[in-house]
Image (cartoon, helix red, strand yellow):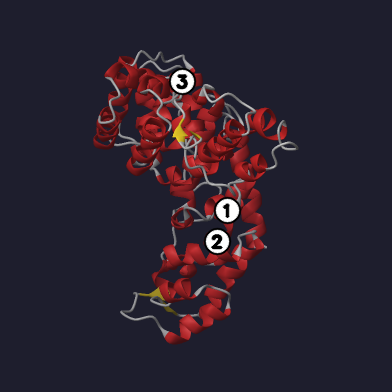
Amino acid sequence: MLASICRRRLLLRLRQIPAGSGTHPAWADPSDGLPFHCYSSTAIAGAPGSEPCPATVSYLASCGLTPAAAAAAGMLRFCSTAKAGAVLALFRRYGFSEAEISDMVRRVPVILTLDPDRILRPKLDLFASIGVQPCKLATTPLLLTRSLDNHLVPAIQFLRGILGTDRDVCRAISRTPRALMADPEKNMHPAVETLRRLGIPEYAVSKILMMEMGVLMVSPDRLSEIFEALKALGLHVTGKGFLYGFRAFCCLSKETWLRKLALYRSFGVSEDLLCKAIKTQPSILLYSDEGIKKKLRFFLDELKLEVSDLMGAPVLIGYSLEKNTKPRCAVLSILMREGKIEPDINIRNALLGSAKMFSEKYVLRYAQDVPDVVKAYEGKITFDGFKDRGVLVPQKT
């Protein structure tokens, strides 16, 4: 009965949040409306022991946890393993998979010490009320240890004031759940105010949060740095490239960003080409160092593309080598060998485009006459270079 009453009050409270105001909402008094507070787990469980408790581990394993998760939670001293079992049962009722539950417990064992009805259920109801799926919550289980009144509700109120609807709040949280760990007063509000102070229009602020809510975890000084860097690239605050650039740069520290630039330069990419490529495809800075090296070596050394041609189509760097680029190259190689396409085809342009476009143009079109193209496209035939009678075919771009 108590849980049912609390859920109704929670939903009522959320409906009263002003939508689409674009301003920082006036937060309700945390003591108003909901009888939830940040309960301490010390009354439920003692301090962790130095070794897992065999009885606890055995019990949790019998409840369906993996050995690793059971061992992690077994370090705690439960006053009642039945309560831990009730927490697991609650997660199952709310749609968490067994794998997700085990992973959550392994990463945040203390979650099993929280009262399932007074603490966890209201938080799960809160997220369910705006549409956040269990699989998204499972990636950041620490969220469920945060105070409902002092953190989660104020954070969602703030987001709804910026984004306008629960649907958009849900989408933003689902893309970057960890960003909801940011403190509303200390992190969220200063970040948004900084974006506004820099002259970013309200609709653009909303879009940035929708694309990468992690911006709320970035310091005001760093946000100002990113803004100036994007301006130096010639990106205007009203342009689509600016939004994508902001998302990419917010995911990088200044040191990482500079290291990525140096890495591209080490392959002969000029400052001008690099700036143009980042302006077109900011995400080229987000790939791992090893991934960048591997892809640049493939395009420049194996396919013999010119640096200017590759950087003129930076989207290619975002394609997966194993799942996309190499299978496409294998298809083209077979078609060259069979005389279906000319050896001097523009390889760069042939590799560009959606999977549907490539499939229709080079796979389905020739599948009956050259069945191997289907196998190649599925990755069953390895690409070993564009060759014609053992001689590497010059690639014209």
* First in sequence: mark 1 vs mark 2: 2
Q: Image point 59% across, 49% down: which residue? A: 380
Residue occupying the far bottom of the picture: 55
Q: Which of 260 and 316 is in front in this view?
A: 316
**Secondary structure beneath label 2:** helix
Left or right of residue 338, residue 223 in this image: left
Residue 235 location, x and y as percent? 39, 15
Q: Which amino acid does label 2 sit on?
A: Glu
Left or right of residue 186, residue 172 in this image: right
**Secondary structure beneath label 3:** loop
Residue 229 location, x and y as percent? 30, 21
Q: Mark 3 points at which residue?
A: 396
Residue 53 higher or lower than 40, as above or below: below
Whether residues under marks 1 and 2 lie with C-beta atoms below 8 angstroms apart, the answer is yes
Q: Residue 100 carries which label?
A: 2
Q: Mark 1 points at which residue?
A: 135
Q: How far apart are marks 3 and 1 (CA)?
A: 47 Å
Callout 2: few (<14), some (14-19), or many (20+) C-alpha neighbours within 10 Å?
Answer: many
**Secondary structure beneath label 1:** helix
Q: Can residue 49 be seen in this view?
A: yes
